[in-house]
Image (cartoon, grey):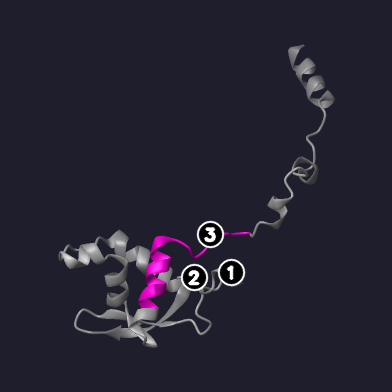
Amino acid sequence: MQQKNRDEERKERPLAASATAKWAGYPNLHRRPHAPNKGRGRLQRQLARAAIASGKAEISSTVFLDFAYPRKRSISKRLSMADRYSVWRILKEIAVPIGRVGPRHAILWRLNPDGRSAGADDRTAGIV
């Protein structure tokens, strides 16, 4: 008996307002970009600075690691795999691996021709 009453109550409830009507009082949210902070993280900015500071077309991952974790590198502290993976993950977005160099086989990277990641919009292209 109670089950029937619950079902009837559900049928009688009004439907929620549509999304456009719900946000009509907030017009600026319609103008907001899809990913406003893309490419603006600490490591993204530091890796972009490393690419600019090196001035070379091909850059070793060691150079990027030095720029990303200067304090750990200056005191000869070993970087964790999480640190290395964070840099590698970002480099996969903004650069192309072209080979290995050096005695420890560091990866050699070449920046994408347009200098930005595949998904970045025009606002985040040259942020440093």
- What's the residue at 79%, 17% (across, down)? 4
Left or right of 97 in this view: 76: left
The quarter of the image holding the N terminus is: top right
Callout 1 amino acid: Arg
Q: Which numbered disc covers residue 47?
A: none
Residue 121 visible in the snapshot: no
Pointers 3 and 1 in contact (C-beta within 8 Å): no
Outermost residue on the top side: it is 1
Residue numbers of the magenta segment: 34-51
User: How far apart in space, not on screen, are marks 3 and 1 (Cα)?
Assistant: 10 Å
Left or right of 40 in this view: 123: right
Callout 2 amino acid: Ile
Pointers 1 and 2 in contact (C-beta within 8 Å): yes
Residue 90 vertical placement versus 1 (above, below) = below
Rendering quarter of residue 76: bottom left
- Which residue is more in the foreground, 80 or 6? 80
The quarter of the image holding the C terminus is: bottom left
- Which residue is more in the foreground, 30 or 82? 30
Magenta stretch holds residue 43: yes
User: How far apart in space, not on screen, are marks 1 and 2 (Cα)?
Assistant: 8 Å
- What's the residue at 82%, 20% (across, down)? 8
Residue 53 locus on image (x, y percent): 35, 80
Residue 18 locus on image (x, y percent): 79, 42
Q: Which residue is identified by label 2?
A: 127
| Lower position in the chain sequence, tag 3 or tag 2 | 3
- What's the residue at 80%, 20% (across, down)? 9
